Image (cartoon, helix red, strand yellow):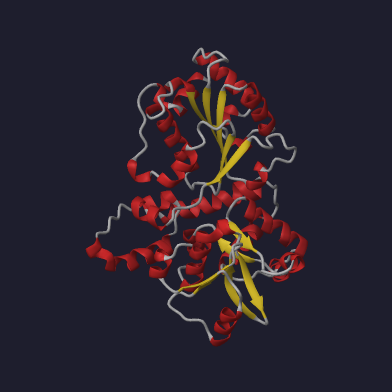
Amino acid sequence: MKTLFYQYNPWWDSGYTPPEQISRPLLEIQLFQWIDNPAVILLTGLRRTGKTTLLKCLADHLINTKDIKKEKVFYLSMDDYQLQSYSIIDIIDEYRKLHRLAYEEKIYLLLDEITYKENFRLQFKNLYDKGNCKIFASSSSASALRDQKGSLTGRERILEVHPLDFNEYLRFSNIQLKKADEGLLEAHFEDYMQMGGMPEYVLTKDRTYLTELVNDILYKDIIAFHKIKSPEMIRDYFALLMERVGKQISLNKIAHILGISPDSAKRYLSLFVDCYLIYLIPRQGKLNEMLLSPKKVYAVDLGIRNLITGFRDKGAVFENLVFHTIRSQSPRYIYQNGIELDFITEEGVLIESKYGRILNEKQEALFKSLKAKEKKIISGYRDFLSSAF
């Protein structure tokens, strides 16, 4: 394993500095603040959103800022074929032997795609309880991260890594706007609405990369992982969801179109959520209304959505962007007497997204009649960029 370990940890032989262009300072700050916290830190989110890069930025920070001895920082991707027959404990033992690190010496473990290892939570608990190691790990599956047995209850923190926001998109695209260039902002914003925020796609502009990424996620995280016998049905289902971005989804209609049962439609829908391809929000109302009413669907990334549907219905695309700015605030949609408003947050902020449009008469009446802590109409890129969501 020695050669493999050195391949994954170039800093053992020489220095390593992540390229400045791909840094994500806000995420790095969140991650770095947990270095001295004993909890296990779990990074999660869609494949290729930058979890691996964050772990490598963490390695650089530990060695060059925190002055941790470089041999005590150990990165490894657990989906490597050569590691299939080894447990996490076995791997860590081999690593300690390689560098003659006694168990009293604290080590920093940066373990990618950890859910490829069975019983990883129990092994993490054993490592945690023994002490002298700080664990950072990543996964692209929400369901695989769920702690069914409570092995890490009270011992973990989770950081979800999302696609690039607009400011990150500008930096990754090497776009630096001066005040005199403010008129170009709208054009760059529309480019962002079309391209989305998958880091590698923003860097390369390679449409083939994005196509292969979507196919890879659908196959690895859904079709192969859950042993689904009809790959085409899953692809068709995903296409239907992308067509419905910003709209309510009817499981009965989807089931009818795909020729499956409503129960199967519901189960497959949860798989798209679990691998972070989509988000669902409920209807505002009493508990039974929230549970029984159709959910609204949003894409994790607009570049992926536009790859499937084409860049059209900018109103839905813009609404999806507004959703991403408030997703941590548990937004719900409002539906009364056949009239729908986009969002109300858990703090009672009512938000309507209108890209270059205005509310119709019935929407405006409902918007004005509802009680809310604050009311916002986001009608274009200027509102979007200036609003403190």
Q: Is residue 181 left or right of residue 113?
A: left
Residue at 57 percent of width and 59 percent of height: 329
Q: Is residue 356 above or below residue 85?
A: below
Residue 86 visible, this angle = no
Residue 243 visible, this angle = yes
Q: Nearer the viewer, residue 178 or 154?
A: 154
Q: Position of residue 118 (x, y in %)?
A: 68, 33
Q: Position of residue 172 (x, y in %)?
A: 36, 50
Residue at 68 percent of width and 43 percent of height: 146
Q: Nearer the viewer, residue 224 or 180?
A: 180
Q: Is residue 109 left or right of residue 185?
A: right
Q: Is residue 50 above or below residue 110?
A: below
Q: Position of residue 182 (x, y in %)?
A: 28, 65
Residue positioned most to the left:
180
Q: Nearer the viewer, residue 207 or 158?
A: 158
Q: Is residue 283 above or below residue 79?
A: below
- Residue 280, by quadrant, is bottom right
- Residue 355, by quadrant, is bottom left
Q: Is residue 149 above or below residue 161?
A: above
Q: How many marks?
A: 0
Q: Nearer the viewer, residue 310 or 34?
A: 34
Residue at 35 percent of width and 55 percent of height: 170
Q: Position of residue 155 (x, y in %)?
A: 64, 34
Q: Is residue 355 left or right of residue 271?
A: left
